[in-house]
């Protein structure tokens, strides 16, 4: 059985910009759907413990007053995801959104993942 393809993201957002971030993500969601995203989930950090060796905060170099956000997109396949990423890079609407992100995109970590279990 084929499973969807997942792009995952972790980033740090200033706590006082939570609503701005939520609005930014909500405005981007229809574009992502247009590009082929089946599911778009944004999660605001609530219980993100400090680790001894590494943790989410360290991974994105979160600063004092920032909250870790964990999000993901589900696509029907890697091919759809690759085509969507190419379209996103060319779309002027995405460029405009990229210029107004309420977080430091340089510290965002992301990657594509093949599910091995989905129950």
Image (spheres, rainbow, N blue to C red):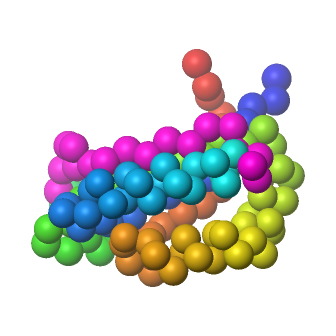
How many tags in the picture?
A: 0
With 80 as the anchor, is 21 left or right in this view? Answer: left
Q: Residue at x 37, y 59 (%)?
A: 21
Residue 96 in percent (x, y) is at 59, 76
Q: Residue farthest to the top?
A: 119
- Give me the residue at 81% from left, 29% from top: 2
Residue drawn where x is 52% and y is 54% of the image: 27
Q: Tell me the magenta residue range.
A: 34-50
Q: Quadrant of the C terminus?
A: top right
Q: Nearer the viewer, residue 46 or 96?
A: 96
In percent of the image, x 65 and y 41: which residue is there? 74
Residue 118, x across and y down, in percent: 61, 25
Q: Is residue 69 visible?
A: yes
Q: Quadrant of residue 14?
A: bottom left
Q: Is residue 10 left or right of residue 99?
A: left
* Quarter of the figure with the N terminus: top right
- In the depicted view, which residue is nearer to us: 116 or 16? 16
Q: Is residue 44 magenta?
A: yes
Which image quadrant for residue 40?
A: top right
Residue 33 shown left or right of residue 119 in the figure: right
Residue 106 on the magenta segment: no
**Residue 9, placed above or below residue 2:** below
Q: Position of residue 51 (x, y in %)?
A: 20, 57
Q: Can I make out residue 57 in this image?
A: no
Q: Vertical placement of 12 versus 19: above or below?
A: below
Kindly give the residue lying farthest to the left in the view shown: 64
- Left or right position of 50 against 108: left
Image location of residue 117, percent across then percent down: 62, 28
């Amino acid at each position: 059985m084929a499973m969807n393809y997942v792009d995952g993201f972790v980033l740090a957002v200033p706590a006082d910009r939570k609503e701005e971030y939520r609005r930014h993500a909500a405005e981007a969601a229809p574009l992502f759907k247009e590009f082929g995203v089946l599911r778009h989930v944004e999660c605001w950090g609530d219980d993100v413990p400090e680790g001894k060796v590494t943790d989410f905060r360290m991974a994105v170099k979160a600063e004092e007053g920032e909250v870790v956000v964990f999000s993901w997109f589900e696509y029907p396949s890697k091919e759809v995801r690759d085509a969507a990423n190419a379209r996103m890079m060319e779309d002027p609407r995405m460029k405009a959104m990229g210029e107004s992100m309420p977080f430091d995109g340089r510290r965002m970590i992301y990657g594509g993942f093949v599910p091995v279990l989905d129950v």
